[in-house]
Image (cartoon, rainbow, N blue to C red):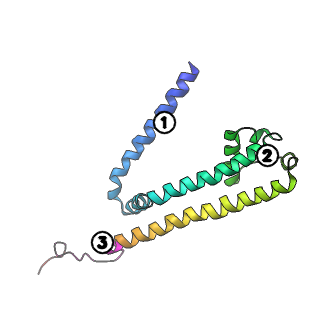
Amino acid sequence: MREEFRDFTAYLGLALWFALLKLFKFVDLFAGLTVLWSTIHKSAGQLFAFAVSYAIVLASFVLFATMVWGYYSDEFSTFESSAVELVRFSFGDGDYDFDALTGSARYTTYVVWCGYSVIITLILFNLIIGLISNKYEEVVEEIAVSEPHRRRGAQPTHSACTSSS
């Protein structure tokens, strides 16, 4: 019974998440949300390509962690647990026994751990920030050109909006 309830709540949570996504059809009511939604929409292709690249790089580090550290540490004993631990490390969460990890290959562990930190944390996270920032600038420029009356302090320029004397 308890497992069925857990499955039900998981499906209910998923259904609620999709229902909340439907609220994005009202995005045009607020200019700030229009910019956000347009940025995500325009960068979707690049974000997908980034996700594939990120998954490939992460999978290579996960395979290394599983093969080299799996025997010495329970956190890296399976592919799934290695993936979870490395993602946790990417976000600064994780308390590892480095003495146990370095028991397998001391210098290799330090080189790979530092390489993972640099590649995932610095390069790939900054790359995704750059992708989104570039698309954000494009969207803001498009909105400024197409709708000049929405800028702060600007007067409407359409003839239908101005009164004729």
Counting the numbered discs, the total is: 3
Mark 3 element type: helix
Q: Quadrant of residue 142?
A: bottom left
Residue 146 visible in the displayed image: yes
CA neighbours of label 1 inside 10 A, class few (<14), some (14 to 19), many (20+): few
Secondary structure mostly taken by the magenta-highlighted segment of the chain: loop
Q: Which residue is mark 1?
A: 13
CA separation in Å, label 2 and label 3 = 56 Å
| Three-letter code, disc 2 | Val
Alpha-carbon distance for marks 3 and 1?
39 Å
Against 102, is 162 above or below?
A: below
Secondary structure beneath dot 2 equals helix
Residue 33 falls inside the magenta stretch = no
Picture quarter with the N terminus:
top right
Residue 84, image x and y in percent? 67, 44
Find residue 145 and report its horizontal and vertical position in percent.
32, 75
Q: Position of residue 94 (x, y in %)?
A: 74, 48
- Label annotation for residue 109: none
